[in-house]
Image (tube, rainbow, N blue to C red):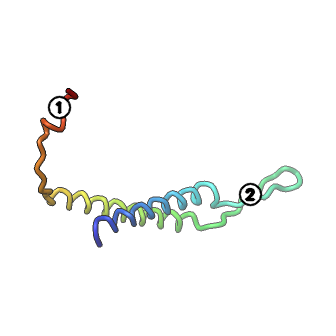
């Protein structure tokens, strides 16, 4: 997998983690209001399963990010740059 492909996948997975986090926090239960203003809360999803999936995705994102940073640490870019020329003030 190329770095660009991995970065694209990581972007998609971050969005998925966000969606699952919202699901875990907000939509994991069903509220039922009774006539006498009592509320019954029923789980709609196994919160532990959602949390395991989020953890799995976050672990992958960490490993992918670390791999990209490691590759950047050993990859040298050949470019000639005159830093003083680039940073000189306007005449």
- The residue sitting at 38% across, 64% down in the picture is 8
Query: Which residue sits furthest right?
Result: 35
Q: Position of residue 23 (x, y in %)?
A: 59, 60
Image side of residue 84 versus residue 38, left or right: left
Label tally: 2
Q: Residues within 10 Å of mark 1 (few under 14, many from 20)?
A: few
Report the quarter where the C terminus lies.
top left
- The residue sitting at 24% across, 57% down in the picture is 69
Disc 1 designates what residue? 88
- The residue sitting at 84% across, 56% down in the picture is 34
Query: Which residue sits furthest bottom?
Result: 1
- The residue sitting at 71% across, 60% down in the picture is 30
N-terminal-most mark, 2 or 1 = 2
What element does badge 1 sit on? loop
What element does badge 2 sit on? strand
Image side of residue 56 versus residue 2, left or right: right
Q: Position of residue 43 (x, y in %)?
A: 66, 64
Residue 53 or 35: which is nearer the viewer? 53
Q: Position of residue 47 (x, y in %)?
A: 57, 63
Report the quarter where the N terminus lies.
bottom left
Query: Which residue sits furthest front?
Result: 91
Disc 2 designates what residue? 31
Image side of residue 69 versus residue 5, left or right: left
Q: Residues within 10 Å of mark 2 (few under 14, many from 20)?
A: few
Query: Which residue sits furthest top?
Result: 91
Residue 74 or 39: which is nearer the viewer? 74
Q: Position of residue 66 (x, y in %)?
A: 27, 59
> How far apart in space, not on screen, are marks 2 and 1 (Cα)?
64 Å
Residue 14 or 51: which is nearer the viewer? 14
């Amino acid at each position: 997998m190329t770095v660009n492909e991995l970065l694209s996948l990581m972007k998609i997975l971050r969005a998925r983690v966000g969606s699952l986090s919202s699901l875990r926090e907000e939509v994991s239960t069903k509220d039922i209001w009774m006539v006498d203003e009592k509320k019954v809360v029923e789980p709609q999803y196994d919160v532990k399963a959602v949390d395991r999936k989020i953890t799995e995705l976050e672990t992958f994102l960490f490993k992918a990010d670390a791999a990209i940073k490691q590759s950047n640490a050993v990859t040298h870019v050949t470019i000639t740059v005159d830093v003083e020329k680039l940073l000189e003030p306007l005449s």
